Image: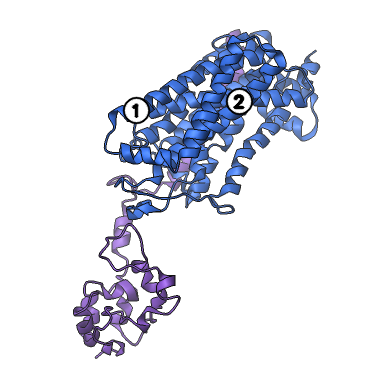
Chain colours: A purple, B blue
Amino acid sequence: MNGFKDAGHLFRFAGLFVVAFLVFWVVRGFVVPKSFGQYGHYRAAAVSEYAARPVKFAGHQACEACHTDIASTKAGGKHAQVNCEACHGALAKHAEDPTSLTPPKPDTAVLCVRCHAASAAKPKDFPQIDAVSHANGVPCETCHNPHSPAIGAPPAAAKGGAQ
Amino acid sequence: MSGYMYPNEITLYWSVLIVLYPYITGLVAGAFILASLERVFRVEAVKPTYRLALLTAMAFLLVAPLPLLFHLGHPERSWEMYFTPHSTSAMAMFGYVYLWYLMAVLSFEIWLDYRREIVLLSQSSKGLLRLVYKIMTLGSTNIGERALHIDERVGWIVTLIGIPSAFLLHGYVGFIFGSLKSNPWWSSPLTPVVFIFSAMVSGIAAVMLIYMAITKLRRQPIDTRCVDTVAMYMFYIFIIDFSLEMLDLVHRIYEADESFRSLNFMAHTKLFFSQIVLQMFLGTLLPLILLFLTQIVQLSEIARKRIYAFSGCMILISVFAMRWNVVIGGQLFSKSFLGYTTYKVGLVTHEGLLVALGLILLPLFFLWVLLKLLPPWSESGASAAAD
């Protein structure tokens, strides 16, 4: 009995652990979402929440239905496979009601180098430039039509609006 | 950057803070192993460093997760690894390994070892400090002979459990690197073992240097028998560590797999200074030779102490360089083995040099607080009160 008394402080230390564990378990009950682990190591409800989000991208078919001139310029150029919204941003709202949102014109001095800045990681036949020595801040569209960028390609009827 | 890099290899994602993390946990594990020399293996000569080693381990352990938290984009989400543990991810289980070592091993052992002083100080001190000590007693003031004997026995068992726990804490860090099969610089079953032995050497060196510095500052004589013994163990463990590193190197050279040319080129160029010059020659061979001299030549006491202090510093630099070469070196080459990138440390960025310096100095501040709160030397107020 005496030994038990002399070891009392050890039980107090152990008690700290028990209390900490109980607090942890209660807090865990509150902070871990109910659907966590239903399918895997994530919150199952997140799947339906994402699915319920409004669609932001219209898709290039929606753009080409109205902007036929640009679609034809683009179709013959190097950017034929680049989706409209890859440069212009998500525009489902504009496609739904063109008057509700006028898309801002991208700054080509910033936009183009996102893909065309020189990098050793890119294939050699991919057009790459050092932006400073190549253009020194001059917007790319001064020389290149963004929808068909090869020099000497058909000029931009490109600038026109929707037909 | 030169040659061919894959796009996700151009920038290094694991910065100097990820270098600090294994370095700090290594110091914790090493300091604890030194403490266990006295407690479990009954090496009486190192007794003056026993409590200091425990407090040093605690001070560094408190800082150990900070480099990771600074590195994370969302540190506030780190709690999730406790709430939703992912048992198949070694990285995600870090929280539990850390908590086990912090609470079940180190805090418990320090509490048991200092309980007598804590109770006495809770009676003799005043003001806020009295309240702190009162809380630390957990409401038990039983410091009878039998209670202290139980503490001694339980403390011994905790240290015994603590040794594999210290190995687990640091071996696990090495395991994370060693198990990354995508990276030939890291992927080796020897990595965790090398990490553990280098951790032991660095932790012992750190405690020895702290002991020497604090004793000097307190204008007390340095216990020569103690530092001789600590340096001897440091030397032996350093030999094992060096042998293992050489084994790893020779194995890589002999195996000469498809990554060898690339890694060999890196060791002779980008990592030449940090690996060959700093880690191997100045940080390993030089202290090994000096420590070897102290074992075979009858040197004066002052010369031995100077050699220990110098070797300790070089070992700390060497082990940091080793962590650097592992973490940074492993990200400098492309998995195509055709290109190399460069790491430039920021100065005032959130993973920069200033933060790293702050994090390496912070444990010393924690240690200072712990030394004030729980003085490891015998002429503390508690002992005076007890007498």
Q: Secondary structure at mark 2?
A: helix
Q: Position of residue B98 (x, y in %)?
A: 49, 32
Looking at marks 2 and 1 on the same chain, the residue that comes earlier in the sequence is marked by 1
Q: Classify the position of the C terminus of chain A by image quarter.
A: bottom left
Instruction: Find residue A59 and report its image quarter.
Output: bottom left
Compare residues B312 and A15 and report the one nearer the observer: B312
Q: Is the residue under label 1 in contact with that under label 2 (CB below 8 Å)?
A: no
Badge 1 crowding class, 10 Å Cα cut-off, few under 14, some 14 to 19, many 20 or more, is: some
| Vertical arrangement, residue B317 with respect to residue B30, above or below | below
Q: Is residue A144 visible?
A: yes
The residue sitting at 26% across, 80% down in the picture is A148
Chain under numbered label 1: B
Task: Say what amino acid the circle numbered 2 marks.
Answer: Gly
Q: Position of residue B42 (x, y in %)?
A: 58, 9
Compare residues A86 and A73 and report the one nearer the observer: A73
Determine the CA span between mark 2 and mark 1: 28 Å
Q: Which residue is mark 2?
A: B312
Chain under numbered label 2: B
- In the rendering, which numbered label is found on residue B189? 1
| Vertical arrangement, residue A158 with respect to residue B175, above or below | below
